[in-house]
Amino acid sequence: MRRAPLAVAGLVAAAALVGALAGPAAADARIVSAQDDQGRPITFDVRASGVNVAEYTSVLRAAAHGNEIRTVTVRIVPQSQIASTCGSLQAVACYSGNRQGGTIVVRAGSRAQFEHSLLHEYAHHVDAAIRNGSRRELNGTPRWWRARSIGTRLARGQVAFDYERGWARSIGEIFAEDYVQVHIRSRYGIPWMNRPSEAVRRAIRQDITGRAAGPAPRAGSGAEPSGPTDPPATSRSRTFRDRVDLAPGEAVNIPFGLLGPGRRIGFTANVSSAEGSGRVSNQLFCQGRRVTGGQGTDGSPARIKRTNLPPGSCRILLTNLSEEPVAVGTTLTLTRTRTR
């Protein structure tokens, strides 16, 4: 899963006081340096206790990679912090980066719990590091592009560079899931395509390492989910509820992601305060631009309703405008108004 501006998956939401990948370091955070088999550095930012970094190192050492491994930082956080760090309640892991370097966020746990997601997010780092002509990133790698007939699929409208047609039809996500299958036989997250053939796997290895030959994918270490996908047509709406306590003048961001066209959101903020004079504002931002906003008071909730929203990374900025503390009960509903 990629982080904004490469939006997250499906219908997702998470409440957090700060934006993804921007929070302060945990008190017990430590930087651990390891090496691959060629002596290239691998950097881990460990923000959870009891982490066996050697297990994470082993996965990346065995993965197809090149010099780009020098420019990635793998941040390991407790499972409970994945949502706030990645900005998605459904996130398994996430990646943020570009050609100069990037950060992967994965959960602390056993190999069975992180292996697939670590490989998937590392594929995004590989993708960002390897140029594929002048095409828009993320776009896979050149030989993989040809082996998967991505140009033809793009012309036919089967895939897209972004999430216009859904997570499972994003070119970057298809490449990432194919990359995982180079290494392990685990759940394949692109249901409308066949798993990559040996020819496709050879193309990926050739693009990354210069050598097409490599070991066959081994059995995965567990039943870890491969990552978020579009919700099925029978599950078109999700509702998230929370309570936020705000001091006078304090603000909180509630981030969420939208994939595909035809999304609708509804947001309600019920305000309560000891003196009955509580007042809050709520503003909706998508892709960094303000979409709409309003205010609410004790007994008169603040509401936002928007339809036909495009895919992207969004947030609601909730601010206490009053001079007393307020408690705000929030309800965020994301609805998929059309399916592929």
Image: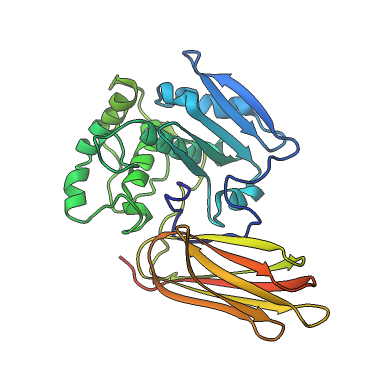
Identify which residue is drawn at 34% across, 26% down: 208
Q: Which one is in front, 319 or 1? A: 319
Q: Position of residue 14 (x, y in %)?
A: 58, 59
Q: Which one is in front, 336 or 302? A: 302
Q: Is residue 209 visible?
A: yes
Identify which residue is drawn at 33% across, 40% down: 175
User: How many numbered discs sit on the rendered protein?
Assistant: 0
Identify which residue is drawn at 29% across, 43% down: 136
User: In the image as oriented, which residue stretches furthest toward the bottom?
Assistant: 299
User: In the image as oriented, which residue stretches furthest toward the right?
Assistant: 274
Residue 167 image-quadrant placement: bottom left
Q: Which one is in front, 28 or 136? A: 136
Q: Which one is in front, 245 or 8? A: 245
Identify which residue is drawn at 72% across, 65% down: 249
Residue 143 image-quadrant placement: top left
User: In the image as oriented, which residue stretches furthest toward the top?
Assistant: 38
On the rendered structure, is 22 left or right of 172? Answer: right
Q: Position of residue 295 (x, y in %)?
A: 61, 78
Q: Position of residue 90 (x, y in %)?
A: 53, 56
257 over 183 or under it: above or below? below
Q: Is residue 110 visible?
A: no
Q: Quadrant of the C terminus?
A: bottom left
Q: Position of residue 114 (x, y in %)?
A: 55, 39
On the rendered structure, is 188 left or right of 11? Answer: left
Which color scheme is applied? rainbow
